[in-house]
Image (tube, rainbow, N blue to C red):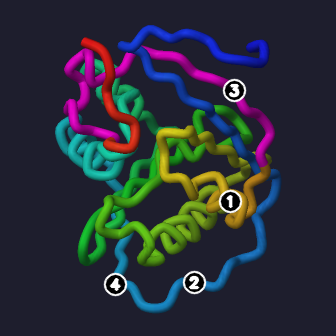
Amino acid sequence: MLSDGYHDVDPTKIVTVETSLQMFARPPERQAPAGGDYRLVRLDAITAAEYLDLYRAVGRDWLWFMRLALSEAELLAIVRDPGVEVYRLEAPGGVGILELDFREEGECELAFFGVSPGLVGTGAGRWLMAQALELAWSRPIRRLWVHTCTLDHQGAVAFYMRSGFVPFRRRVEITDDPRHLGKSPRDSAPHFPMIGG
């Protein structure tokens, strides 16, 4: 455990607080948002380029980088695994990503979830979460879980809790800033500007 107080960090690193949340049963359905011309498309034979385009469209502002660090072979081994389902939300004004990972028996990880900037605050996220819960709990799982961090939208933890998830762990992650490595554009995550080099 980190001790109370301040801790120096290399300026080429990023530090986030990760919150993990879980549920052990399907929650009551929330009322669907009004309106919205939404369509969910499963991407079974997705290419690495298609996946990364979608990943960047949703995650660029939040400095999503984990999948950008993988080789094409490593990425395809995950997203084309029979235990992983990748979906694209198509909607006027943007897209969304939903990735469900069933590779751990009896569990599902909501591995990636979000909407592009033009859909934030429109109800598209609530609609997408309703689809995620339906898809996950239609399988024989005992646990659905997700993690988010302080680089994500400031309402992410509250959104997941309203959706039925309960926090169970909080931890600090320190990693290389992908903008320094050239894995993410230097102007990504304007709410967390680059410092150093």
Q: Which amino acid type is shown beneath numbered disc 2?
A: Ala
| Front residue (pair 180, 125) | 180
Residue at the spot of label 2:
32
Q: From this view, report whether residue 161 is shown above or below residue 104.
A: below
Q: Secondary structure at mark 2?
A: loop
Label 3 packing within 10 angstroms: few (<14), some (14-19), many (20+): few
Q: From this view, report whether residue 105 is shown above or below residue 195.
A: below
Residue at the spot of label 1:
137
Residue at horizontal 43 percent and vertical 34 percent from the top: 81
Q: Which percent across, then down, holds residue 77?
A: 37, 26
Label 1 packing within 10 angstroms: few (<14), some (14-19), many (20+): some
The mark lying in front, picked from 1 and 2, is 2
Could you tell me how far apart the alpha carbons at marks 2 and 4 are, in whole angstroms? 12 Å
The mark lying in front, picked from 1 and 3, is 3
Q: Which residues are magenta?
A: 167-189
The mark lying in front, picked from 3 and 4, is 3
Q: Which percent across, then down, holds residue 87?
A: 39, 56
Q: Which percent across, then down, holds residue 38?
A: 36, 78
To which quarter of the image does residue 136 belong?
A: bottom right
Q: Would residue 63 be counted in the magenta stretch?
A: no
Do residues under tags 1 and 4 come within 8 Å of each other at their CB atoms? no
Could you tell me how far apart the alpha carbons at marks 3 and 4 are, in whole angstroms? 38 Å
Residue at the spot of label 3:
171
